[in-house]
Amino acid sequence: MKQNLNLEDWLRKKITFTQFWYLDKSQTVEFEFKKIHGPRSSYAFVRFDCNPSTHLSFNSNNVFDSKLSPDWIKLFEASICEAIVDSLICNSLTPYFGCELNLIQIKYDEVGSSEDSFYKATKEAMKELIITSDWKHYV
């Protein structure tokens, strides 16, 4: 059977879910992404304070170095948000929706950090959050 992929239906289902997981108690998660490709490298470090909430939220209050341009900060934050959504909402039929994520620390390399490295670091931190935290099922 052939079906058309309808992204609008998928998105509607994901944002109007009637069941989800919510974080039961606060936890801190972090991940340091390092990869060396010959003479080149990729690097990013993220640390989040994660707290129970009735909805998914993300805050990054002044964790980025003032040396970074606003354009780079915007790109890094967008990658972090994308990884959060991909990890917590798009990973299963019952999303991990009930948590407040506060980005409390980052580390970066002026040459080796990129949007991709922050995406990968965040994705791994969210994987750790899912696996190591206590979650309650909301119906």
Image (spheres, rainbow, N blue to C red):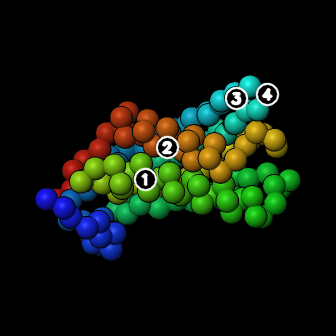
Image-based side of 61 in relation to 92, left or right: right
- Mark 2 residue type: Lys
Q: Residue at x 34, y 62 (%)?
A: 54
- The Cα atoms of the two marked residues, 1 and 2, are separated by 8 Å
Which of the two labelled residues, at mark 1 and mark 2, occupies the earlier sequence position?
Answer: 1
Q: Which residue is mark 3?
A: 37
Mark 2 vs mark 3, foreground winner is 3
> Residue 117 in the image: x percent, y percent?
63, 42
Q: Residue at x 24, y 53 (%)?
A: 94
- The Cα atoms of the two marked residues, 4 and 3, are separated by 6 Å
**Residue 127, can we see it?**
yes
Circles 4 and 1, Cβ within 8 Å, touching? The answer is no
> Residue 74 in the image: x percent, y percent?
68, 63
Q: SS class of the residue under badge 3?
A: strand
What mark, if any, has residue 123 been given in the picture? 2
Q: Which residue is mark 1?
A: 86
Q: Nearer the viewer, residue 97 or 136?
A: 97
Q: Residue at x 65, y 51 (%)?
A: 115
